[in-house]
Every structure is written in structure tokens, then in C-alpha cells.
Image (cartoon, helix red, strand yellow):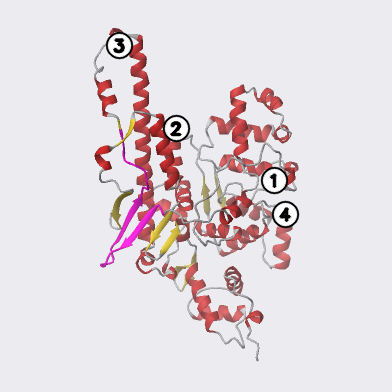
Amino acid sequence: MASKLGQAGTQVQTQTQTLTPQQLLVSQLTEMPVEALYERVDQELKENATLERDTHDDADFDGVGEGSSESESSESTYDQTADYSSPDDVPDNINGSSRPEATETVVGETLSFYDQLEEQIGFFHLSEHEEELIRYLIGSLDDDGLLRVPLQQIQDELEVYHNIATSQDELQRVLTLLQNFEPAGIGARSLQECLLLQVRHAADHDSPLKRQLERVLTEQFTNLMQNRWDRIQRALRLQDDEVSRLQHEVHRLNPRPGSSMGEALGKNLQQITPDFIVETDPYGQLTMTLNNGRVPPLRVSDSDLQFLRSFEGRDAKTLSRTERDGITYLRDRVEKAQSFIDALQQRRQTLTLTMQTIMRMQHAFFESGDETTLRPMTLEDVARQTGLHLSTISRVSNSKWVQTPYGIYRLRWFFTSAAKLGDDEVSIRRIKAALQEVVDSEDKSQPLTDDALARELQGRGFEVARRTVAKYRVAMGIPVAKMRKRREA
């Protein structure tokens, strides 16, 4: 599935091919933070005796992966009548209680729900006009992250109160992009659309189970709201075990994606575990290390492999049924163990390649720690440089952290949209830094208006309009001129 956005030509891509079990495993492991990955590895070790800790590498194992230097290569229609007006209207069988809670956040992080969504705008190449529209849509979301205001009303508000001309078709295209933001379900206009977005954005969205779930949500939504699974089962001709799996999947969906973002900031603030460690030596050379935490090196059992080899070349007819069954069972365990090891290796390659690319593109920041040196960089830029899928870069940037000499940052922090400085493109952060300098140095008895601030920035070479300055000023928490005026004693 793909959708295009207006004049900027931005294309939001989602996977259209069916994921193999191995691809799905790689996707799941890649998105996991370090501690969750350790728990998954520990579970695999307990369930598959053929998978073992590699004791040959264990002696040197310190929980940190091999380091590398910077020079290494390495549209749908929904039933709007299915909306719900308050949290009390959400059925008990859809409460999202089984979704994993965010527990790893930076101590002191104070990003609001709006800030977290606004950060993701920089992931895409958008025109200034499109940015204005998507920011307004974000500001129109309710606390649950849903858009309950009709697009016609939003169009009228933009044209009457903000002098921004648009159309419902354009707003729909921008809303479609917003609905690709994390967490899935953001920007939905009804409960049905919210749940469908989550299913369609899942890594395994094309699996048989997810396709069945989509049918339930599209064809049997009324019965689902009334918890009439007997009718759903008859209508879709489902087996009892299929119904049980679908009920479990429905229970995992989150009808309030916006409120879950707020919870992530308010629960159990604690120090996060960085996935990467970037250091600079005295000669300015950057090195990157992948943090494996407590995850041990793994291998396939030598004794199991030798046992299988002992039967190689033997005629199956000479084997007893017990021997054949035993060989089949053991071969299956070996294949699963090797697949898991391969998936971990691919995870390591994906993370390393992504981080190396970000280091290369944002080299100036990693050298100096000065955020005004950040270059414009979007998800598409990194996907193109790495050759990885856009959705892979999105998941890595949203779930991974890097420790630098200047602090710990989520990877998505390094993505920023572009602005003009003469003939060159610069990061929006550079303009905001310049704006802060102008405000700090102004005469507080006669503070500068937005028009005056725009002229000051234009004098420094930044091509910004008064409306753009006002937008940045509000985002930075800088009051209007009359509120900044110092009163005479």
C-alpha cells in the first residue's frame, strides 16, 4: 500500500508483500530494546535445547558488541457511524490492556503528546504549507489521539482564522500521512478506523491471522462492538481456535493511542539503556559500538549436529520409525536454532548500518555536540543510503537510543526537516537557535514583533516568513512581544 502527499511528492510506503516467518522474526528482534531482547533469547534457550550459549566466545563476552569506525562500510472508506464519543463507549473486549507498556524512558524527559508527534514531521520531505496543515491536524487531535473534528470544519478554521487556503482533498492526503505516525492509530476519525490502522501497520499485517482480523473489523464491526462472537464465527466460518486467537488479537489493540503516549512519559521514569555507544578519540575519529546488554553469543549444539551427520548417507528404509521421527524432530530444532541465530545477526547488521549512516550524515554533531550543526535528514534519506525499507528505518529510529559524549538521544532526534539559508539547506534547529539568540539579545523595553524577528533572521540569510517565525516561536515556548516586554520600575 502506498500514498502520495501533495506537491512535495512525499510517498509513504508500507510493505505489500507477505512476510516470511524469518522476516517477521527479524523485524520483531530489531525493534526490541536490549533488555527485552535478552528475555527473548533466554526464552529461546529454555525452549530449544539445541540452541546453546557459545562458551568459546563467553570468556571474552562483556555485553558489548563489536565496535566499528565511521569509515567502515558496512485509501479506505470507513463507517463513520461506528465512532465513539467517550472512553465509556469502548467495549470491554477492546481495552488495549495487553499492549506492552513503555518503561524505558529518559530521566527527566518532558516531551508532550504534541511534541512527540511534531518530532516525526521531520521524518518526511514536506513543503512549508504541508507542515502547517499537519501541525494544525496534530493540534486538533483529542487526548486519545483521534481526530473528531470534520475536515470541512478544519478547512473553514484554517481559511477564516489563519488565512491558509486548502481543500478537503489536500487535508485528507495530509491526514493519511499523519496516520502513518507512531503509535499506530493516531489521527483516526473513528474507533473502527483506529483499530484498522493498527492492524494494517503491523509488521505481520499480511499474515493469515491479521487478514482475518481485518475482516472482523470491516465486515463484522457491529457484532464486535456487541461482543457477539458467535455471530462472527458463523458469518466468517471460523474454527473455535481461530476465534480464540482473534479475541486475543482484538484485546491487544489500543483504542486510545494518544493516551498511551502520555502514559509513557508519566510512568516509572528511569534511565534508559542505550543501544549504541558513540565515542570520539583524540584525533576526531568516531567509533560506534552496538550494546548487546546481557545477550550472550549463541551457537547450534555440536553434539546434535554430529548426531544428524551420523545418519547422513544411510538409506531411510534401514531406519526404524522411532529413529526417523527422532531425526525429523532434531532437524527441526536445529533449523529453528540456526534461524534464530541468523535473525540476531541480521538485526545486528541492520542496526549497525543504520547507525553508521546517521553518524556519517550527522558527523558534525557527533564531533562537536552542537545541535545547530545537524543537517536536514529524513527517513527517506537514510533508507536510500542504507538500502533498507522505509518502515525498517522508522522502527529503528523510534525504538533505539544512542549514548554520545554529549548525552543520550533517541535516534529519531537526529531527523529534522530542511529550511533555506541562501542557496543552501539547513536544519530547522539552526533557525530556532538563531531565533533564540535574537530574542535573548533584543531590547526588552521594546521587544521585537514577529515581523521584526523575521526581518532579523532574513538579515542573517534565513529565508523565513513572519508566519514561520510565529510557528517556531510558539513551538519554542517564547511568548509574544507584548508578554516579553520588561516593565519599568
Query: Residue 406: x percent and y percent?
Result: 40, 66
Upstream in sequence: badge 1 or badge 4: 4
Question: 206 and 109: which one is in front?
Answer: 109
* Mark count: 4
Mark 2 Cα shell of 10 Å, populated few (<14), some (14-19), many (≥20): few
Q: Tell me which residue sits at (52%, 76%) in the image.
A: 436
Q: Pointer 3: what residue?
A: 316
Give the quadrant of the N terminus: top right
State which mark lies toward you, 3 or 4.
Answer: 3
Packing grade of label 4 (10 A; few <14, some 14-19, many >=20) is few
Q: Quadrant of residue 233?
A: top right
Instruction: Give the residues in magenta.
Output: 274-299
Which of discs 3 and 1 lies nearer the camera? The answer is: 3
**37 to the left or right of 222:** left
- The answer to whether residue 74 shows anywhere in this view is no
Crowding around mark 3 (Cα neighbors within 10 Å: few <14, some 14 to 19, many 20+) is few
| Lower sequence index among marks 3 and 1 | 1
Disc sitting over residue 190 in the figure: 1
N-terminal of the pair, mark 4 or mark 2, is 2
